[in-house]
Image (cartoon, helix red, strand yellow):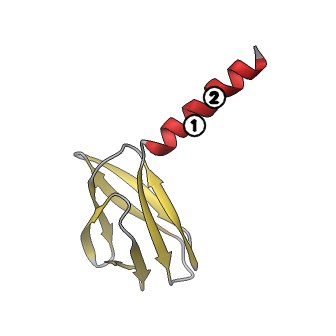
Amino acid sequence: MKLKMMMMVAVFFVTTFVSAYSVPYYNKDSKTYTFKVKINGSTREITFNGSTTGTAHCPPTADIAEIESSCGWVKVKNGQKITIKDGCITVN
């Protein structure tokens, strides 16, 4: 019973992780940024840690999202790599 419950929890987390919009990034700034993201008509927030390379996630899944940085809105495809420098996003 315990094993079955653990498997159900694992499937839930994997499904949630896979169904999220994700964007690999390199943040050249030491500051952590939280930007607004428009996905499928709704606005959410996504956080990019400072001075690091990583992948930021934001539900729900989408092919394209618009992310607002200090330099304006940028369209980014799901899984497309970006770089953050001086608070601005550039798509690689």
Position of 33 with respect to 10 (left or right) is left
Name the quarter where the N terminus is drawn: top right
Q: Say which residue appears at 47% left-offset and 54% top-offset.
A: 57
Vertical placement of residue 5 versus 25, above or below: above
User: Which dot marks residue 41?
Assistant: none
Q: Secondary structure at mark 1?
A: helix
Vertical placement of residue 49 versus 13, above or below: below
Q: Say which residue appears at 25% left-offset and 70% top-offset.
A: 74
Looking at the image, do the residues carrying marks 1 and 2 touch, with CB atoms under 8 Å apart? yes
Q: Position of residue 46 (x, y in %)?
A: 44, 58
Name the quarter where the C terminus is drawn: bottom left
User: Which dot marks residue 13?
Assistant: 1
> What distance separates the C-alpha of mark 1 from that of mark 2?
6 Å
Q: Say which residue appears at 22% left-offset and 46% top-offset.
A: 41
Q: Position of residue 56 (x, y in %)?
A: 48, 60
Q: Position of residue 68 (x, y in %)?
A: 30, 67
Q: Amino acid at mark 1?
A: Phe
Q: Amino acid at mark 2?
A: Val
Q: Secondary structure at mark 2?
A: helix
According to the picture, the residue beneath numbered tag 2 turns out to be 9
Within the image, what quadrant is residue 49 found in?
bottom right
Q: Position of residue 2 (x, y in %)?
A: 77, 19
Q: Say which residue appears at 63% left-offset and 28% top-offset.
A: 9
Within the image, what quadrant is residue 83 found in?
bottom left
Vertical placement of residue 4 versus 34, above or below: above
